[in-house]
């Protein structure tokens, strides 16, 4: 049974209760305390309610055995209720004894969005605006038969500041916790009559910048005792932060990798993606080769065509050179205009010329149809809710980051 380390353990606590120290609670009589507060455990001087949806199977088992003094088989029962049947209340876990359910109600909470709003585009794409504990989050369901893909966010806003992206424009408001990432998927799943087959971490935020939470969320959603999205059906999308791809390689799993390249000319790329200044294109390619070599999988290069920025034949040549020798497919996407930004999509003719140059030279090139543009749910268009939050609060960072920002090697 894996032992949960302190840092990870802290991240599973309900934040409002983390500040309640034992000394303060000493002043309350034990009996009154037990009745008034929905808390049962004192853990190293703290009162604890855990965010149970954010626990991997091993963490859940460890917590049940060590903290609640239950038998290990309870973990399978509970994990199934939470992640396979996806109930939202301990009361619905009918094969658990009433006593155990009451214990759970006092010791843990199941994260649920406070409010769920959705908007559907003519192409069937549904954009969700979820009010999560850390703030508003945007997630998207994309029907692309035979796939039915959920696009999840990993941060409230983003600190990468990509120039074509509304989330980048909105700034950074904090990392999502594991349960908040998982809750997006379960809420969309519960609101849809089709089974979600694929997951992409391409919503708000840079997954590698919130890696600890992301890797635990991946472990939960790919667990075959739960919602069981296969590792090969999950794609982590990154702008390629220094050292970021290595984190995925080190997991030794089969998760897909998509790199938002957007230009294979260093200068252009740095203009589009400021963090590209911290990583050279040869280094990025080296990291991608490490991924493809270790996993035996092709990577995806995401390339958003922007008029006059990265749509020239010279850029197409640079892209073909970058892709040479790299097991990859290239996803071309026509830029979705973002209100407040000057950049525009190229003409049909330019897109055609760019793709025609690549087709015979690269292993696989697709021109992806943009989905969800009518509801601002397309690539680069998420983040309106965060932008509103920035305007309302006049601040760019509301939730304390879980650790120091780091985008350097
Ligand atoms: S494109 Fe991705 S990494 Fe860049 S600002 Fe937008 S959300 Fe962040």
Image (cartoon, grey):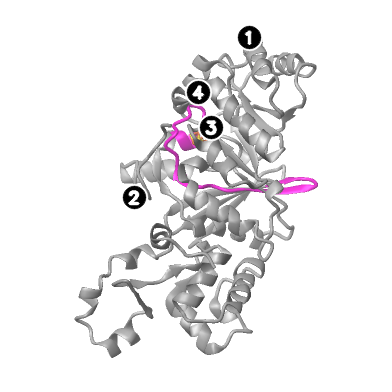
From the top left corner, tell me how far across and down residue 73 is, in percent.
61, 78
> Mark 3 to mark 2: distance in Å?
23 Å
Identified at 46% across, 73% down, the residue is 108
Label 3, ligand 1: CB separation under 8 Å: yes
**Disc 2, SS:** loop
In this view, the mark in front (3 or 4): 3
From the top left corner, tell me how far across and down residue 162 is, in percent.
48, 29
Q: Are marks 1 and 3 in contact (CB under 8 Å)?
A: no
The residue pinned by badge 3 equals: 239
The residue pinned by badge 1 equals: 314
Q: Are marks 3 and 2 in contact (CB under 8 Å)?
A: no
The residue pinned by badge 2 equals: 400
Is 272 or 64 nearer to us in this picture? 64
Label 4, ligand 1: CB separation under 8 Å: no
Q: Which residues are magenta?
A: 142-168
Residue 352: image quadrant is top right
> Mark 3 to mark 4: distance in Å?
11 Å
> Mark 1 to mark 3: distance in Å?
22 Å
């Amino acid at each position: 049974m894996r032992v949960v380390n302190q840092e990870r353990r802290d991240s599973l606590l309900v934040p409002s209760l983390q500040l309640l120290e034992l000394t303060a609670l000493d002043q309350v009589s034990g009996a009154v305390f037990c009745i008034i507060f929905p808390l049962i455990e004192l853990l190293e001087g703290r009162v604890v309610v855990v965010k149970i949806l954010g626990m991997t199977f091993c963490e859940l088992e460890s917590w049940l055995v060590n903290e609640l003094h239950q038998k290990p088989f309870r973990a399978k029962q509970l994990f199934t209720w939470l992640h396979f049947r996806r109930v939202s209340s301990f009361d619905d876990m009918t094969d658990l004894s009433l006593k155990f359910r009451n214990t759970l109600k006092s010791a843990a909470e199941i994260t649920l969005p406070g409010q769920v709003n959705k908007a559907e585009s003519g192409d069937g794409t549904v954009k969700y605006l979820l009010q999560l504990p850390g703030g508003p989050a945007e997630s998207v369901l994309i029907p692309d038969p035979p796939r039915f893909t959920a696009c999840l966010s990993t941060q409230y806003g983003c600190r990468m500041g990509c120039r074509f992206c509304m989330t980048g424009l909105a700034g950074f408001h904090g990392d999502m916790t594991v349960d908040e990432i998982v809750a997006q998927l379960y809420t969309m799943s519960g609101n849809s009559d089709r089974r979600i087959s694929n997951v992409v971490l391409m919503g708000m935020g840079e997954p590698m910048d919130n890696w600890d939470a992301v890797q635990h969320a991946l472990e939960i959603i790919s667990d075959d005792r739960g919602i069981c999205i296969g590792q090969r059906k999950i794609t982590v999308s990154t702008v390629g932060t220094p050292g970021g791809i290595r984190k995925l390689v080190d997991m030794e799993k089969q998760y897909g990798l998509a790199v938002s390249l957007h230009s294979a000319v260093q200068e252009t790329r740095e203009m589009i993606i400021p963090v590209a200044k911290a990583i050279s294109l040869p280094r990025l390619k080296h990291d991608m080769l490490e991924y493809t070599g270790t996993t035996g999988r092709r990577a995806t290069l995401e390339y958003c065509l922007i008029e006059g920025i990265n749509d020239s034949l010279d850029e197409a040549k640079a892209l073909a050179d970058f892709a040479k020798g790299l097991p990859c497919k290239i996803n071309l996407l026509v830029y979705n205009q973002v209100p407040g930004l000057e950049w525009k999509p190229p003409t049909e003719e330019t897109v055609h010329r760019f793709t025609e140059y690549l087709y015979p030279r690269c292993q696989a090139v697709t021109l992806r149809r943009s989905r969800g543009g009518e509801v601002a749910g397309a690539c680069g268009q998420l983040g309106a809710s965060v932008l509103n939050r920035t305007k309302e609060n006049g601040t760019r960072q509301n939730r304390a980051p879980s650790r120091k920002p780091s985008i350097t090697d």
